[in-house]
Amino acid sequence: MASTGQEPDSVAVESEPYIPASQTLPEITAKAVVLGIVLSAVLAGANAYLGLKVGLTVSASIPAAVISMALLRFFRESNILENNAVQTAASAGESLAAGVIFTLPALIMLNYWQGFEFLPTMAIALCGGILGVLFTIPLRRALIIEAKLQFPEGVATAEVLKAGEEGGEGAKLIAIAGVAAALLKLCQTGFKFASGSISGAFSAGRSLFGYGSDLGVALLAVGYIVGLNIATLVFAGGLISWLFGIPIYSALLSPSDATALFGDAHGYELAEEIWSKRIRYMGVGAMATGGLWALVSLVKPIRDGVQSSFEAVRAAREGRGEDVLRTENDMPITWVLRGTVA
């Protein structure tokens, strides 16, 4: 399990794999496969229900990692690579369920389907899942090793797995932090003892200024993982919207236009309406531009990753496959191409 991404101040440090690449441990074992299938089915079903019920799904990686560590401890021999395989399988099931529930209902909304048939739904999910797995083979090197993209959830899951493997203070700290975060969230959203956010607004002339912040500790953890650079960019986007975009727009807005567009909203409610219906499209444009730029910047890493995959195939044919490190031993690219075409 190698480190992912550039160093975001203190967490995602580029380093050697936790298990040395030269060391080989049992990974795709019978117990890991069975547990991965069970957790994948359970978490996929739970996320499908939750997504259809409230329109949101929850990540399965960290819960699956914790459950896997707890269950595999009952076996005499288990290791972190087996835990990683289990959480990967469970995460794939959850992601596949999310893909199904957020896309296939569109066929009913368009009157193309009259209901959900089991076999067509299963076939679509199966094809999508297989293609997703096949596409990750060349993209792993391109996105993680070459481009060094930061994956906050992946980093967090890796830290949980390492803490569980080492035990001691690390595992205890994660448990305490999890309980504390859960209690705080319960007080905020369950018992309403504490507020989950702060917000307000004030006027200066005809300009309306709004401010607000979420008080969830999950965002603190994400900010710590992604690092100062990305966190600063996100914060700067909020400042541009709320300290410049909304005040300028509200200053140019006449009272009659404000009533026609936003009804009787005033104060922070008006600021939020302006942000929701006008200003946030600035952020959408920035995200689209950033996405296009990311695609352009990933052309070289993707090309290098595909070339490396073909080089690995040639090395295997020439009898040099034994020199390939465990962490570089991918599925042959020829299998990927055949599976994609099929």
Image (cartoon, rainbow, N blue to C red):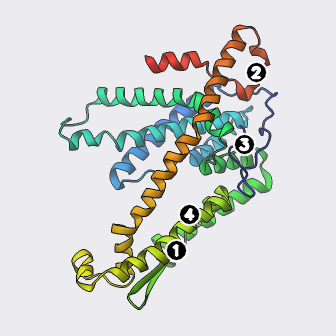
Left or right: residue 43 versus residue 269 is right
Closer to the N terminus: mark 3 or mark 2?
Answer: 3
Closer to the N terminus: mark 3 or mark 1?
Answer: 3
Left or right: residue 335 versus residue 83 is left
Label 4 or label 1, whichever lies nearer to me, is 4
Label 2 or label 4, whichever lies nearer to me, is 4
Left or right: residue 333 versus residue 160 is left
Kind of residue indicated by mark 3? Ser
Closer to the N terminus: mark 4 or mark 1?
Answer: 1
Position above or below: 206 against 40: below
Marking on residue 234:
4
Where residue 324 sits: x, y (%)?
76, 21
Element class at badge 2:
loop
Marking on residue 213:
1
Q: Which residue is mark 2?
A: 324
Kind of residue indicated by mark 1? Ser
Closer to the N terminus: mark 2 or mark 4?
Answer: 4
Crowding at mark 2 (Cα within 10 Å: few <14, some 14-19, many 20+): some
Element class at badge 1:
strand
Q: Quadrant of the N terminus?
A: top right
Q: Which residue is mark 3?
A: 3
Element class at badge 3:
loop
Marking on residue 49:
none
Q: CA distance from mark 3 to mark 2?
A: 19 Å
Q: CA distance from mark 4 to mark 3?
A: 24 Å
Q: Tags 3 and 2 in contact by the CB under 8 Å rule?
A: no
